[in-house]
Image: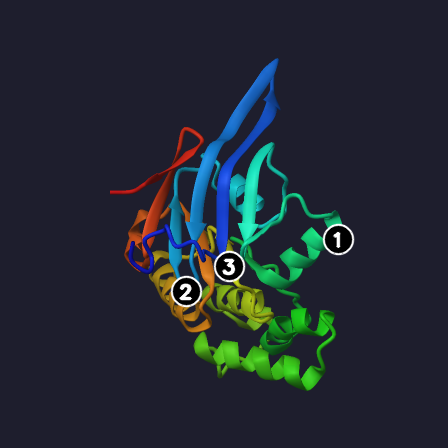
């Protein structure tokens, strides 16, 4: 199949037969039921579905934030659910970037230092961390906002900073959960365009959950959560 056809054995992330259920009353609620999917480098895959359909649960499994009840998660050819906790944490910290609906920026830091923070935590020097942060912020169209604090930025600008922060460690995977859910339609489209461009430039495998069908045009493939499974959208 073609570059983004979803069957490339070199997929950056691959989920195999993922299942997840939660106690509900006297029984269980099955949220994920044998989910299979994969995402390649530089591919932008959309995961659509209404609230409560299991999108967030699937992202948590893919990001090694939550262990599913069954199945396997392969990242760059390594099966990760069977790894010891410390190794799994290292894979998550070094190889996966997360973007959420709420940006969670540190209010006392500038945009530049918010983005540089993960590199500083990883032990990189201040000069290099700020250099990488500036590179990403310029790509995101925020070259003139480097010294602004979050309170001085619009909602769309704050979310662009959060996206840059998620990618500053050069992860191979980006998982985004309703990244523009709090933005108006015009701002949402602009932020999505910036996210799409950065995914292409950085060659990240991106899986983006949203309920906004208007954003489908940005996606290489669209998957739909339905009855605990993933279906290819028409």
CA neighbours of label 1 inside 10 A, class few (<14), some (14 to 19), many (20+): few
Label 2 – label 1 distance at C-alpha? 28 Å
In the rendered image, residue 129, in percent from the top left (x then y), is placed at 65, 79
Which residue sits at x=50%, y=44%?
A: 15
Name the residue nearer the viewer: 5 or 24. Answer: 5
Residue 147 seen from this side: no
Residue that sits furthest to the top in the current view: 26
CA neighbours of label 3 inside 10 A, class few (<14), some (14 to 19), many (20+): many
Q: Is residue 78 left or right of residue 228?
A: right
Placement of 75 over or under 81, stated as above or below: below
Q: Which SS class for mark 3?
A: strand
Which residue sits at x=48%, y=63%?
A: 155
Query: Which mark is on residue 42?
Result: 2
Residue position marked by numbered label 3 in the rendering: 174
Residue position marked by numbered label 1 in the rendering: 86
Which residue sits at x=56%, y=60%?
A: 97
In the rendered image, residue 2, in percent from the top left (x then y), is placed at 29, 58
Residue 220 sits in quarter: bottom left
In the rendered image, residue 227, in percent from the top left (x then y), is placed at 41, 28
Q: Is residue 112 left or right of residue 142?
A: right
Residue 194 sits in quarter: bottom left
Which residue sits at x=52%, y=36%?
A: 18
Name the residue nearer the viewer: 143 or 54. Answer: 54
Q: Which SS class for mark 1?
A: helix
In the rendered image, residue 181, in percent from the top left (x then y), is placed at 44, 51
């Amino acid at each position: 199949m073609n570059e983004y056809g979803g069957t490339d054995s070199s997929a950056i992330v691959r989920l195999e037969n993922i299942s997840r259920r939660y106690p509900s009353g006297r029984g269980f609620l099955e949220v994920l039921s044998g989910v299979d999917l994969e995402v390649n480098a530089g591919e932008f895959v959309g995961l659509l579905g209404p609230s409560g359909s299991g999108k967030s649960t699937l992202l948590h499994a893919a990001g090694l934030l939550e262990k599913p009840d069954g199945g396997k998660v392969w990242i760059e050819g390594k099966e990760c659910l069977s790894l010891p906790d410390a190794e799994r944490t290292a894979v998550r910290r070094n190889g996966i970037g997360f973007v959420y609906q709420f940006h969670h920026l540190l209010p006392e830091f500038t945009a530049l230092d918010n983005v540089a923070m993960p590199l500083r935590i990883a032990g990189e020097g201040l000069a290099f961390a700020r250099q990488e942060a500036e590179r990403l912020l310029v790509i995101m169209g925020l070259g003139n906002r480097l010294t602004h604090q979050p309170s001085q930025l619009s909602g769309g600008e704050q979310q662009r900073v959060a996206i840059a922060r998620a990618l500053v460690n050069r992860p191979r995977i980006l998982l985004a959960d309703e990244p523009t859910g709090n933005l108006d339609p015009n701002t949402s489209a602009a932020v999505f365009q910036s996210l799409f461009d950065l995914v292409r430039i950085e060659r990240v495998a991106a899986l983006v959950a949203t309920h906004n069908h208007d954003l489908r045009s940005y996606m290489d493939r669209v998957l739909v959560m339905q009855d605990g499974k993933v279906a290819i959208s028409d």
